[in-house]
């Protein structure tokens, strides 16, 4: 099965929003390509606030956690932040198991995430 992984990156207020357009994210090469796309967007647009919207995602590999942590590290260098929205409860468990729920803030939907991060 040829897995299609893409992201839509938009700006709402002064916040970049990354929307994963896939239900399953596990292909190593495609995850690397998406990671590079996000990093390029950050550099080209001088981004320091980002929301990762997982509304469509039902499964992701641990490599996705690495991408999010890397982006978080890059944005923290700019005194920025990363938050997560619309994550499936089963996927949220992955963050809890890895204790990453302690370093990310989670929001039930993209709108509330953007509002919270934009006001900081």
Image (cartoon, rainbow, N blue to C red):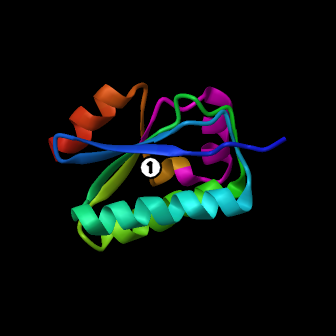
In-image side of 95 versus 41 (left or right): right
Q: Residue at x 67, y 44 (%)?
A: 94
Q: Is residue 12 above or below residue 77?
A: above
Q: Badge 1 is on which residue?
A: 104
Residue 75 sits in quarter: bottom left
In-image side of 2 versus 56 (left or right): right
> Magenta stretch?
84-100
The residue tagged with tag 1: helix, strand or loop? Answer: loop
Q: Residue at x 36, y 30 (%)?
A: 110
Q: Where's residue 26, x and y in %?
A: 73, 50
Residue 27 sits in quarter: bottom right
User: Dot 1: few (<14), some (14–19), or many (≥20) neighbours within 10 Å?
Assistant: some
Q: Residue at x 65, y 57 (%)?
A: 30
For this rendering, which residue is in front, 28 or 97?
Answer: 28
Q: Residue furthest front?
A: 2
Q: Is residue 64 above or below residue 119?
A: below
In-image side of 77 versus 103 (left or right): left
């Amino acid at each position: 099965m040829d897995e299609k992984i893409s992201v839509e990156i938009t700006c709402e207020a002064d916040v970049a929003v990354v929307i994963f357009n896939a239900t399953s994210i596990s292909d190593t090469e495609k995850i690397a390509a998406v990671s590079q796309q996000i990093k390029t967007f950050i550099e080209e647009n001088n981004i320091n606030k980002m929301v990762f919207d997982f509304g469509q995602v039902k499964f992701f590999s641990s490599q996705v956690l690495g991408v999010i942590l890397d982006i978080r590290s890059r944005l923290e260098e700019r005194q920025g932040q990363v938050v997560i929205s619309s994550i499936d409860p089963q996927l949220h468990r992955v963050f809890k198991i890895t204790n990453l729920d302690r370093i990310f803030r989670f929001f039930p939907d993209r709108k509330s995430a953007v509002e919270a991060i934009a006001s900081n």
